[in-house]
Image (spheres, rainbow, N blue to C red):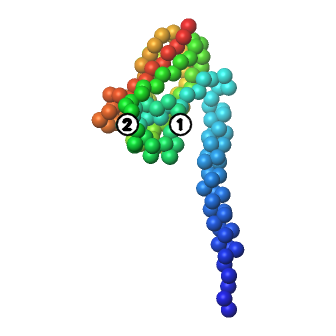
Amino acid sequence: MRVNHNKLDMLFFSLLILIIIGLPFAIRSYNGYVWKDKIPPNAKVFTLTGNARYGWILGEVEAKDIISLWHRHNGIKKPVITVKKGDVVVLKLRSSDVVHGFSLKDEGIFVSDGIHPGKTILVSFTANKAGTFTFSCNAICGKNHQNMQGTLIVKA
């Protein structure tokens, strides 16, 4: 007796596709749930993703973006973050490749434990001083380590 498994195969295939498509949305929802208690509601939130080849990238870098980064040859663009004096600032620090560090000396912020790929480190502070400040990676992360810098502008 021959059994037809086409319906069962289609069910499992559909379930697999649903999981693959739904997983990023589930992760984003989970992250929002976890971070809601850690991020003040009035905070200015910025995501910085470290990449040993391209420096700090303003924004979240997805897995598909890593492939396009490999083909980008337009030089390194250092990120600029602009806030107002008195703003509560939250930085979501991520890494797309190797372990990075983070330093914003003027605010007394030093992440020396490392920003590991796949993990997010939250750093929060109140921008109390107006001016232009430099942030950088404080862990030797590759041959372009000196380019891992960005600018924080705090307007009065």
Q: Quadrant of the N terminus?
A: bottom right
Q: Residue at x 45, y 43 (%)?
A: 68
| Amino acid at the residue labelled 1 | Glu
Residue at screen point 48% across, 10% down = 131
- Residue 110 visible to an observer of this rendering: no
Please rate how many residues cluster around mark 2, counting C-alpha atoms within 10 Å: few if below 14, some from 14 to 19, many from 20: few
Residue denoted by label 1? 60
Q: Which residue is mark 2?
A: 73
Q: Where is residue 22 shown, x and y percent of the image?
A: 65, 52
The amino acid at mark 2 is His
Return the residue nearer the eye: 54 or 68.
68
| Residue displayed at 65% across by 38% down | 32
Pinpoint residue 12: horizontal percent, then vertical percent.
65, 68
1 vs 2, front mark: 2
Residue 90 position within the rendered picture, expressed as x and y whole percent measured from the top left: 56, 26
The Cα–Cα distance between marks 1 and 2, rounded to whole angstroms, is: 20 Å
For label 2, the SS is loop
Q: Residue furthest left?
A: 143
Q: How many marks?
A: 2
Residue 94 visible:
yes
Left or right position of 126 against 69: right
